[in-house]
Image (tube, rainbow, N blue to C red):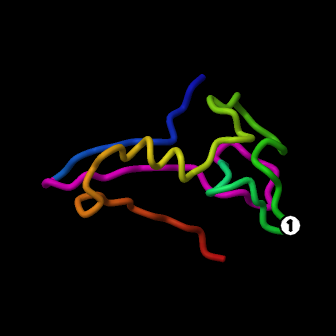
Amino acid sequence: MAVSAQRKDEFLGFTFYGYANVPPTPFRYKDWERYDVSRYVDPGCIPPEEGFRTMQPEVDLEWATIQDELKVLTGENDPGEVRFPVSQPAV
Protein backbone atom coordinates (compact mmCIF):
# COMPACT_ATOMS: atom_id res chain seq x y z
CA MET A 1 0.00 0.00 0.00
CA ALA A 2 1.49 3.35 -1.01
CA VAL A 3 0.70 6.38 1.11
CA SER A 4 1.79 9.79 -0.07
CA ALA A 5 3.39 12.03 2.54
CA GLN A 6 3.54 14.92 0.07
CA ARG A 7 0.87 17.13 -1.43
CA LYS A 8 0.55 20.35 -3.45
CA ASP A 9 -2.55 22.58 -3.69
CA GLU A 10 -3.19 26.09 -5.00
CA PHE A 11 -5.52 28.64 -3.39
CA LEU A 12 -5.90 32.40 -3.98
CA GLY A 13 -2.71 32.57 -6.04
CA PHE A 14 -0.56 30.82 -3.44
CA THR A 15 0.86 27.33 -3.62
CA PHE A 16 0.57 25.27 -0.45
CA TYR A 17 2.69 22.19 0.15
CA GLY A 18 2.15 19.40 2.61
CA TYR A 19 5.06 17.26 3.73
CA ALA A 20 4.72 14.70 6.52
CA ASN A 21 8.25 13.38 7.05
CA VAL A 22 10.38 14.44 10.01
CA PRO A 23 14.09 14.15 10.89
CA PRO A 24 15.20 11.13 12.97
CA THR A 25 13.58 10.84 16.40
CA PRO A 26 14.36 8.69 19.47
CA PHE A 27 11.20 6.66 18.83
CA ARG A 28 11.17 3.20 17.19
CA TYR A 29 8.18 3.89 14.87
CA LYS A 30 9.82 5.06 11.60
CA ASP A 31 7.15 5.27 8.86
CA TRP A 32 7.45 9.07 8.50
CA GLU A 33 11.16 9.67 9.07
CA ARG A 34 13.92 10.79 6.70
CA TYR A 35 17.41 12.18 7.19
CA ASP A 36 17.28 15.98 7.18
CA VAL A 37 20.13 17.25 4.97
CA SER A 38 22.74 14.55 5.64
CA ARG A 39 23.02 11.16 7.34
CA TYR A 40 23.73 12.80 10.70
CA VAL A 41 21.57 11.58 13.58
CA ASP A 42 21.33 13.55 16.84
CA PRO A 43 22.54 11.70 19.95
CA GLY A 44 19.77 9.51 21.34
CA CYS A 45 17.89 9.31 18.02
CA ILE A 46 17.45 6.21 15.88
CA PRO A 47 18.29 6.29 12.14
CA PRO A 48 15.31 6.09 9.75
CA GLU A 49 16.34 2.71 8.31
CA GLU A 50 16.26 1.13 11.78
CA GLY A 51 13.25 0.66 14.02
CA PHE A 52 9.70 -0.48 13.24
CA ARG A 53 7.71 0.14 10.04
CA THR A 54 4.12 -0.68 9.15
CA MET A 55 4.75 -0.36 5.38
CA GLN A 56 7.64 -0.67 2.95
CA PRO A 57 9.26 2.67 2.12
CA GLU A 58 9.14 3.84 -1.51
CA VAL A 59 12.67 5.29 -1.29
CA ASP A 60 16.09 4.12 -0.17
CA LEU A 61 16.01 5.42 3.41
CA GLU A 62 19.79 5.28 3.71
CA TRP A 63 20.13 8.08 1.14
CA ALA A 64 16.77 9.90 1.04
CA THR A 65 16.76 13.35 2.68
CA ILE A 66 14.05 15.85 3.50
CA GLN A 67 16.05 18.49 1.65
CA ASP A 68 16.06 16.48 -1.60
CA GLU A 69 12.38 15.56 -1.35
CA LEU A 70 11.37 19.21 -0.79
CA LYS A 71 13.37 20.25 -3.86
CA VAL A 72 11.48 17.70 -5.96
CA LEU A 73 8.11 18.63 -4.41
CA THR A 74 8.46 22.39 -4.96
CA GLY A 75 10.21 22.21 -8.33
CA GLU A 76 10.75 25.60 -9.95
CA ASN A 77 8.04 27.49 -8.03
CA ASP A 78 8.77 31.05 -6.90
CA PRO A 79 9.63 30.77 -3.17
CA GLY A 80 7.78 34.05 -2.53
CA GLU A 81 4.49 32.42 -3.53
CA VAL A 82 4.96 29.17 -1.62
CA ARG A 83 3.48 28.31 1.78
CA PHE A 84 4.35 25.40 4.06
CA PRO A 85 1.86 25.02 6.94
CA VAL A 86 3.97 23.60 9.79
CA SER A 87 2.92 21.70 12.88
CA GLN A 88 5.20 20.47 15.64
CA PRO A 89 4.35 18.65 18.84
CA ALA A 90 5.02 20.51 22.08
CA VAL A 91 8.21 19.38 23.75
Residue at point 84%, 45% (across, down): 51
Query: Is residue 23 within the magenta segment?
Result: yes
Residue wearing tag 1 = 44
Query: Is residue 4 within the magenta segment?
Result: no
Q: Is residue 76 left or right of residue 53?
A: left
Residue, far bottom: 91
Residue at point 45%, 64% (across, down): 86
Q: Quadrant of residue 80?
A: bottom left
SS majority, magenta: loop
Residue type at the position of mark 1: Gly
Q: Is residue 9 positioned above or below 81 on the image?
A: above
Residue at point 39%, 61% (across, down): 85
Q: Quadrant of residue 90?
A: bottom right
Q: Which residue is nearer to you in this view: 16 or 55? A: 16
| Residue 23 pos. (x, y %) | 66, 58
Residue at point 70%, 28% (across, down): 56
| Residue 64 pos. (x, y %) | 64, 42
Image: magenta residue range: 12-32
| Residue 69 pos. (x, y %) | 51, 44
Residue, far top: 1
- Neighbor class of circle 1 (other Cα within 10 Å; few <14, some 14-19, many 20+) is few
